[in-house]
Amino acid sequence: MANRDYVNYHKATGLYIGRHMVTLLDGTRKRVCVYGKTKQEAKEKLKKAIAIALTENPTKKCQLTVEQYLDQWLPMAKGIRESTRNKYNGVIHKHVVPKIGQVKLCHLTIDKLQKMFDDLTKEGEDAGKPQVTRTCQIVKNILSKAFRYGEKKGIVKHNLITNVELKEYAPKPTTIWKPDEANRFMELAKQDEYYLIFALLITYGMRRGEALGLRWDDVDFENKTIYICQQYTSDGKGGWHICPPKTKKSIRSLPLLPNIEAILTEIWEQNPKASGAILSKNGEYINPNSLEWHFKKLKRSSGVSNVKLHSLRHFVATGFKRAGIAPKDAQTVLGHSTVAITENIYQHCDENDQAMALQQYENYLTKSGISV
């Protein structure tokens, strides 16, 4: 057995032999073996051999296939939520593995990657799935993260995915309710068992999972505060689970407004010993699919525009803008990671907003003595 210097005397040759297993950049292991006339010589040779092995670029030697590499990278990828990791895994094995999964990393080229995306786009369009362009964006984003890690570790020479060209994705504009539609919906929703959830969504712009994940422990009646510190959302495997909010900025406290306090108080008085989720079914958190069903039913009955549940968050963000609330304040209430997300994605502008903006500017010109 080798000592801690990994050097032993070899009686048959009369030399000292140094052996050590080295983990290479691509995750494979390589045995390093050297000989020396003296123990010190063998130690020095072994040290140099190990250093050389660790700096070898495994790009040409790496025998990992794309599938093997992605399966090794995904579990240890940092900065990815577990539910997102599960979704990534599904995307990889549905769209990437069938196309280039068996290609070795050392043989992967820009042309092969480009062909994969071109094929995915054509297959989606032929099947009448215009959202395939968004799917390609997601696939590219995942592979970019994976290859960026490989580039740092020397497994790939450079991030090939950056040179891949995709068909431009043009998302459909988000439709939001007009104030009178929101009013009609909420008037009807007062008779629904999930009224509290809808009230939270349209008052605070909470995410669906944040509203469903609220517990009595998160409501402080004395200090009139609601704490957002968890959400009930998809686990990426077709199920649901409790997890932290989407981003660090999503962990926040919100003032308990009088109308929401009244609704919560009424629910509490019906069961003053309640604990756990504020709204639950048989002690369990409400299934998001059940909430979606109630939302669709109320939309049909109230005759409002057919918007998505998440668009209520856009409605609130846009309402903040129209009310003259500073974007930074809107960001903190909504729990966005940056003000840019609030302004560029969630706040919308229609013809009335434009007319009001121009009217205000016209008033400014008049007060400034500027005539046109």
Image (spheres, helix red, strand yellow):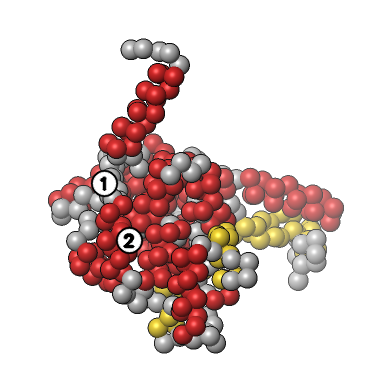
Q: Position of residue 96 (x, y in %)?
A: 34, 55
Q: Amino acid at mark 1?
A: Lys
Up-down relation of residue 31 to residue 271 (above or below): above
Write down the quadrant of residue 359 in the picture.
top left
- Left or right side of 290 for 23: right
Say few, some or many: other residues with alpha carbon within 10 Å of mark 2 (under 14 / 14 to 19 / 20 or more). some
Up-down relation of residue 232 to residue 24 (above or below): below
Q: Which residue is mark 1?
A: 172
**Residue closest to the eye, 233 or 212:** 212
**Residue located 55% across and 87% down the image:** 273
Which numbered mark, 2 or 1, is in the foreground of this view? Answer: 2
- Quick one: quadrant of the N terminus? bottom right
Q: Is residue 119 visible?
A: no
Q: Which residue is mark 2?
A: 309
- Quick one: quadrant of the C terminus? top left
Up-down relation of residue 178 to residue 265 (above or below): above
Q: Position of residue 29 (x, y in %)?
A: 59, 59
**Residue located 27% across and 61% down the image:** 184
Q: Position of residue 3 (x, y in %)?
A: 80, 66
Please tell me which of labels 2 and 1 falls first in the chain: 1
- Left or right side of 112 for 259: right
Q: Which mark is residue 295?
A: none
Q: Amino acid at mark 2?
A: Leu
Up-down relation of residue 34 to residue 276 (above or below): above
**Residue closest to the eye, 267 or 28:** 267
Q: Are marks 2 and 1 in contact (CB under 8 Å)?
A: no
Q: Is residue 194 visible?
A: yes
Write down the quadrant of residue 356 in the picture.
top left
**Residue located 46% across and 85% down the image:** 270
**Residue located 36% across and 12% down the image:** 371
Name the element at disc 1.
Answer: loop
